[in-house]
Image (cartoon, grey):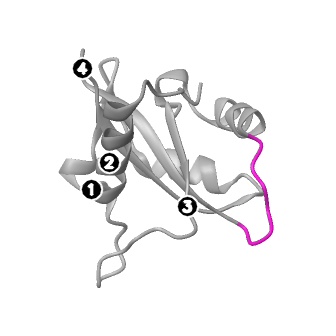
Amino acid sequence: MDRKKDAIRRRGENISSWEVEQAAVAHPAVTEAAAYPVPTELTEDDVAIALVLVPGATLDEQDFARHCADLLPGYALPRYLTVLPELAETPTGKVEKFRLRHRVLRRRRRVQPTHFW
């Protein structure tokens, strides 16, 4: 179950970050994933995802997009993608999604984002 602040609502639909993360880690190049909401200027949220790749793996973004599209409904597809060497965690082992969210928001303010898809 998601924490309330991690709940994602897009196009009137509630999206489980866990389901998005499970679809992402099913990709052979991905070892860890964290899906989280990013507020939009218009309505509700966009879906963002941070990935940690398998050591030595590379990620073809279009292949990853097709992979997610096969497993998730259109409204749940991530709009922003970040690849990191590791995901920051709390002492209890939960991913610090607020740090990931702030990272996307800072980038979005500086430049017009290149959307993942």
Q: Tell me the quadrant of the picture where the C terminus can be found.
A: top right
Marks 3 and 2 close (CB-CB < 8 Å): no
Marks 1 and 2 close (CB-CB < 8 Å): yes
Cα–Cα span, label 1 and label 2: 5 Å
User: Which quadrant holds residue 55?
Assistant: bottom right
Q: Circle 3 — which element?
A: loop
Read off the magenta span: 54-60
Query: What residue is pinned by disc 1?
Result: 98
Marks 3 and 1 close (CB-CB < 8 Å): no
Marks 4 and 1 close (CB-CB < 8 Å): no
Cα–Cα span, label 4 and label 3: 26 Å
| Closer-to-camera residue (9/95) | 95
Tell me the residue at 30%/77% (across/down). Answer: 90
Tell me the residue at 54%/27% (across/down). Answer: 114
Q: Determine if residue 14 is in view.
A: no
Q: Residues within 10 Å of mark 3 (few under 14, many from 20)?
A: few
Query: What residue is pinned by disc 4?
Result: 41
Vertical comparison of 44 with 16: above or below? above
User: Which quadrant holds residue 26?
Assistant: bottom right
Q: Which mark is residue 101?
A: 2
Vertical comparison of 10 with 22: above or below? above
Sooner in the amino-acid sequence: mark 3 or mark 1: 3
Q: How crowded is mark 4: few (under 14 residues within 10 Å), some or many (20 or more)?
A: few
Residue 52 sits inside the magenta stretch: no
Q: Circle 2 — which element?
A: helix
Residue 59 sits inside the magenta stretch: yes
State the residue lying farthest toward the bottom: 91
Q: Tell me the quadrant of the picture where the N terminus can be found.
A: bottom left
Query: What residue is pinned by disc 3?
Result: 84
